[in-house]
Image: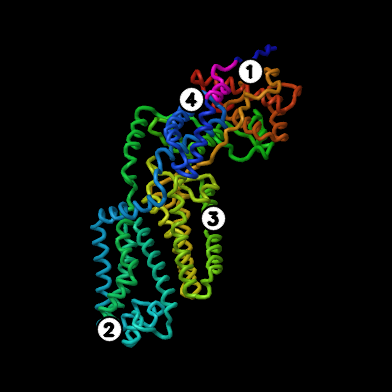
């Protein structure tokens, strides 16, 4: 019978490593928390100078821990801390308002100037549509009814009198129409035209073809209206009314060409201040290849299912829960597909994990619920302010508030340092740039305007049309199919990107904060009294070790009992001590053995791998 010998103490002590560096990690976590919630103004000059020092110390700790340690809780905490530090130090350094101001004052005008050829083409298409309908209506007024639906014309057709047409331009009242109704109509026109502007931008992803068709259609309606008013001698008046009330209708024209340009792959040019970081990151990839260690999460919560958890440790498991070597390889390959290489300028691969479609859907539903609740509170505020007594003003304010809230909810939150809406924060995900640089305002605006095309605009049009009996069953079915096709686009690519992510050059990745949990190997309780032989410790590998760590941290009595009985049966040990003492002792000595192997370049992934 083999004599039991104690496992040698590891040359690299997890407890000593944590004792030496844990104070720096806690200090860095504290500074990041203040920076995320209150911005750089919350830190003193000394703390700002300390921030990059602590960040690089954390990266150093992460590199050492990946190469020499198997404490998964510690690894998860360091990876999360390093990722937060990277995106805050190399990421956004401006407030939301300053970023929006720079976007509208500099980035957007620059984008429009860069696509002046496309803008000229769009203007010619609109002019061509207007000339086509104008010439046809001028020669035969009956063509007007083919170009402008009756419900949109509102009585402004070839049969209308001069007095009525003049009144629709603001010279008097038309058909009992009061000033309040004009206010509501003007607000609706503004919000409608703004949404058409967003659609013109978003449709640019399909090489601009749908955008050109939309603009030609808009030109046809404009030309037909102009022909009717010109025939009554009101052409100049109609032109003046358009330039006053149709500001968004005309200002959206330059939006279409940038949308078409956005349809090309995003190269991350942004604000131009992240190129040095990207260059250092590319250099780091050439000089130092990132490590390909994989620290996996369990496929499910095995703490709540002790039988399935015990199957991990059974060498001859029942058929219904048997895990083979091939199954483990497939599972590791599936987990690897979710990881993306993300090398920092310091040469450390952060290994970003792509967020699942379920998490993104949950985040969207939470945000939609919050938007609806905010609208309800906004409505109650209008009632409390007494605006409800004037229905036209109340409707005008509500329409403007609803438009601003729905349009800028996602943009406003993602422009912040955390790059996440409240729904994304609750689900533990965030938005990042695929090239590793700063998440620029133009990328945030682009990815969220595409959501209008994917979801909101089709559903809004179908809802309004159904309420007015303007949408047939086939049209509604086509609208639902359109929304589903674009909304489910992320299910058909390995990076789980929406159409907006593809155009803006972004990823949505996991950003959960892993708590720095206690060090199991530092706990006392007489666990050193139990000794295991090398043969008893050679039964399992890294994967089983980290699952055993989950059991010990979960402290579920049933799971601990089943796993302890399984390990005792496998190594031939009688029941002579408490389950928690037995498992803690086995975990400590198995961890020490596997970490010694890491020091000599030997990494045993699981119990099926050879030593």
Foreground tag (1 vs 2): 2
> The magenta stretch spans which residues?
9-20
- Mark 2 or 4: in front is 4
Please tell me which of labels 4 and 1 falls first in the chain.
4
The image's mark for residue 64 is 4
Task: State the separation of the CA atoms marked 1 and 2.
Answer: 97 Å
Mark 3 and mark 2 lie on one chain; the one further toward the N terminus is: 2
The residue carrying pointer 3 sits among few (fewer than 14), some (14 to 19) or many (20 or more) residues within 10 Å by Cα, namely few
Q: Which residue is mark 1?
A: 535
Q: Does label 3 or label 4 sit earlier along the sequence?
A: 4
Q: Which mark is residue 365?
A: 3
Magenta highlight on residue 12:
yes
Which residue does the image show at 72% across and 21% down from the upper left?
Answer: 573
- 311 relative to 203, above or below: above
Point out the tag, 3 or 1, that comes first from the N-terminus: 3
Q: CA distance from mark 2 to mark 4?
A: 82 Å
């Amino acid at each position: 019978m083999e004599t039991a010998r104690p496992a040698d103490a590891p040359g690299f002590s997890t407890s000593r490593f944590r004792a030496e560096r844990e104070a720096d990690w806690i200090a860095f976590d504290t500074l990041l928390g203040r920076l995320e919630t209150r911005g750089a103004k919350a830190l003193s000059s000394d703390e700002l100078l300390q921030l990059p020092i602590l960040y690089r110390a954390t990266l150093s700790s992460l590199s050492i821990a990946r190469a020499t340690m198997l404490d998964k809780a510690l690894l998860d905490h360091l990876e999360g801390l390093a990722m937060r530090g990277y995106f805050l130090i190399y990421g956004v350094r401006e407030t939301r308002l300053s970023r929006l101001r720079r976007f509208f004052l500099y980035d957007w005008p620059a984008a429009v100037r860069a696509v002046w050829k496309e803008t000229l083409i769009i203007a010619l298409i609109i002019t061509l549509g207007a000339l086509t309908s104008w010439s046809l209506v001028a020669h035969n007024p009956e063509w007007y009814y083919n170009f402008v639906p009756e419900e949109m014309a509102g009585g402004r057709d070839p049969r209308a009198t001069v007095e009525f047409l003049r009144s629709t331009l603001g010279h008097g009242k038309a058909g009992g129409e009061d000033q309040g109704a004009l206010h509501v109509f003007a607000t609706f026109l503004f919000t409608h035209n703004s949404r058409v502007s967003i659609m013109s931008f978003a449709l640019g992803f399909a090489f601009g073809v749908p955008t050109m068709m939309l603009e030609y259609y808009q030109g046809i309606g404009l030309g037909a209206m102009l022909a009717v008013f010109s025939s009554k001698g009101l052409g100049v008046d109609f032109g003046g009314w358009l330039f006053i009330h149709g500001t968004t209708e005309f200002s959206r024209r330059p939006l279409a060409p940038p949308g078409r340009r956005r349809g090309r792959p995003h190269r991350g040019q942004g604000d131009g201040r992240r190129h040095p970081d990207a260059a250092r990151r590319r250099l780091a990839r050439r000089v130092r290849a990132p490590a390909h260690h994989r620290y996996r999460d369990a496929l499910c919560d095995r703490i709540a299912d002790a039988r399935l958890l015990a199957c991990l440790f059974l060498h001859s498991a029942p058929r219904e829960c048997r895990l083979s070597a091939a199954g483990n390889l497939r599972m590791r390959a599936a987990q690897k597909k979710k990881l993306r290489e993300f090398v920092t300028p310091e040469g450390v691969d952060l290994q970003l994990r792509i967020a699942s479609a379920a998490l993104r859907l949950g985040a969207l539903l939470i945000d939609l619920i919050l938007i609806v609740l905010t609208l309800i509170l906004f409505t109650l505020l209008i009632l409390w302010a007494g605006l409800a007594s004037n229905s036209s003003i109340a409707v005008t304010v509500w329409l403007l508030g609803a438009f601003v809230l729905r349009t800028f909810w996602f943009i406003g939150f993602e422009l912040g340092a955390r790059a996440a809406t409240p729904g994304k924060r609750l689900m533990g995900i965030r938005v990042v740039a695929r090239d590793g640089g700063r998440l620029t305002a133009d990328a945030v605006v682009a990815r969220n305007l595409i959501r209008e095309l994917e979801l909101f605009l089709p559903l809004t049009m179908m809802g309004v049309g159904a309420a007015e009996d303007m949408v047939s069953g086939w049209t509604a079915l086509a609208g639902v199919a359109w929304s589903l096709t674009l909304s489910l686009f992320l299910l058909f690519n390995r990076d789980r990107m929406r159409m907006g992510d593809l155009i803006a050059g972004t990823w949505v990745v996991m950003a959960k904060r892993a708590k720095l949990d206690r060090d199991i190997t530092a706990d006392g309780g007489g666990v050193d009294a139990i000794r295991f032989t090398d043969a008893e410790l050679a039964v399992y590998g890294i994967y089983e070790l980290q699952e055993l760590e989950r059991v010990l941290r979960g402290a579920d009595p049933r799971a601990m009992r089943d796993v302890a009985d399984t390990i005792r049966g496998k190594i031939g040990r009688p029941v002579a001590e408490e389950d928690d003492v037995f498992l803690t002792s086995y975990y400590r000595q198995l961890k020490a053995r596997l970490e010694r192997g890491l020091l000599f370049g030997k990494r045993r992934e699981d119990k099926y791998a050879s030593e």
